[in-house]
Image (tube, rainbow, N blue to C red):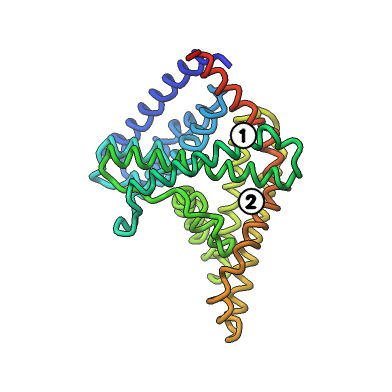
């Protein structure tokens, strides 16, 4: 990897992103919301999809594919119809750019937020755990039980995302004087799949995907099928779109034909979540099950974690291995270290 070339591309792409978002910002002052604004924004959306192709670094591919190609584009689509975090009529350009470029959202209940010092301490501990787990996986993962190796790798993914995204929120929140919601809420304590996907794992993605996919599909499907069944279709559509976006991100890493394993993983979890909801709706009609559902949720936590780990081991882990993210990341660390030696 040519670090100088990567830095040149980083500057070019960052400037292009800023110009594209500024264009959208001022466009919103003159073009009414709806399809006219969407048509004017579409060239920016298309260009944002192409930007990760300019990089070879796994860190830059990961950041731009997640922040720009996925989240920023979804926020711009919401903005086109007058919704989402970019649509406040009084939002200044600096906040528009920040909200669009990064997975952040203003806190929904600032009174309950953890203090900054506690968050910094938490992220330091998680960063240390990440370094330890990553080193163990890199040195011994090939000789471990495959499921144990995946559990270690999955822990690294969660810890790295929580630390990186949380640190970004803290820095931008300090600069803008705003409190932001956390990116994760201890997903290993999830009591159900609904609790895991809807409230604990990658909360910012949920807040963007829900209004862009779930709500429109729910509204449209309610017109043609009974209202009680419409949420099922909306849930399945949301997981399918999430699967497609993950397949796109993996394509950025590999530049190879997708295996569709990751798409299958999200479809299975969509079906599993629908099944869980239907079972709960059925059981809640019985008095003896209401007591269990109220008191026994903590018992389900290990089963939820095990189910997520097992299904991701079968249908998500293989694509991560195909990307060779760990090996490429260590090569980049070594290349950066050589500069200062």
Looking at this view, name the residue that lies furthest to the bottom: 287
Quarter the N terminus occupies: top right
Disc 1: CA contacts within 10 A as few (<14), some (14-19) or many (>=20): few
Residue 67 against residue 228 in the figure, above or below? above
Q: Mark 2 points at which residue?
A: 266
Q: Where is residue 316 in the image (x, y as percent from the top left)?
A: 67, 44
Q: Which of 76 and 274 is in front in this view?
A: 274
Q: Nearer the viewer, residue 315 or 137?
A: 137
Q: Which of the 4 image quadrants contains residue 130?
A: top right
Query: Which label number is shown at residue 106?
Result: none
Disc 2: CA contacts within 10 A as few (<14), some (14-19) or many (>=20): many
Q: Is residue 81 visible?
A: no
Count of numbered marks = 2
Q: Where is residue 164 in the image (x, y as percent from the top left)?
A: 46, 38
Q: Which of the 4 image quadrants contains residue 259?
A: top right
Could you tell me which secondary element the residue under label 2 belongs to? helix
Marks 2 and 1 close (CB-CB < 8 Å): no
Q: Which residue is drawn at 33% across and 38% down?
A: 172
Looking at this view, name the residue that lies furthest to the left: 90
Q: Can residue 116 be seen in this view?
A: yes
Q: Position of residue 191 (x, y in %)?
A: 56, 64
Q: Label 2 vs label 1: CA separation?
A: 29 Å
Q: Mark 1 points at which residue?
A: 135
Q: Which of 304 and 322 is in front in this view?
A: 304
């Amino acid at each position: 990897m040519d670090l100088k070339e990567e830095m040149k591309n980083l500057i070019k792409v960052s400037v292009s992103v800023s110009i594209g978002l500024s264009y959208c910002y001022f466009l919103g002052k003159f073009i009414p919301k709806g399809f006219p604004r969407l048509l004017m924004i579409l060239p920016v959306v298309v260009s944002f999809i192409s930007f990760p192709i300019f990089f070879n670094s796994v860190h830059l591919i990961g950041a731009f594919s997640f922040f720009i190609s996925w989240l920023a584009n979804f926020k711009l689509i919401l903005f086109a119809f007058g919704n989402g975090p970019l649509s406040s009529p009084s939002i200044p350009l600096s906040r528009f750019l920040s909200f669009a470029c990064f997975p952040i959202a203003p806190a929904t209940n600032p009174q309950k937020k953890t203090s900054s010092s506690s968050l910094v301490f938490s992220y330091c501990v998680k960063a240390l755990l990440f370094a330890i787990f990553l080193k163990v996986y890199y040195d011994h993962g090939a000789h471990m039980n495959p499921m144990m190796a995946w559990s270690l790798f999955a822990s690294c993914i969660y810890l790295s995302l929580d630390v990186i995204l949380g640190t970004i929120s803290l820095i931008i929140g300090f600069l803008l004087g705003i409190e932001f919601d956390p990116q994760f809420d201890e997903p290993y304590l999830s009591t159900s799949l609904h609790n895991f996907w809807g409230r604990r794992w990658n909360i910012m993605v949920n807040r963007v995907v829900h209004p862009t996919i779930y709500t429109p599909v729910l509204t449209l499907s309610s017109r043609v099928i009974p209202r009680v069944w419409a949420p099922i279709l909306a849930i399945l559509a949301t997981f399918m779109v999430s699967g497609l976006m993950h397949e796109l991100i993996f394509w950025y890493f590999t530049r190879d034909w997708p295996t569709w394993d990751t798409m299958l993983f999200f479809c299975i979890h969509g079906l599993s979540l629908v099944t869980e909801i239907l079972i709960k709706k059925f059981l809640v009609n019985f008095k003896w099950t209401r007591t269990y559902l109220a008191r026994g949720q903590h018992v389900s936590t290990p089963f939820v974690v095990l189910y997520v780990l097992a299904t991701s081991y079968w249908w998500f882990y293989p694509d991560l291995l195909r990307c060779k993210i760990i090996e490429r990341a260590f090569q980049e660390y070594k290349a950066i270290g050589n500069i200062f030696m």
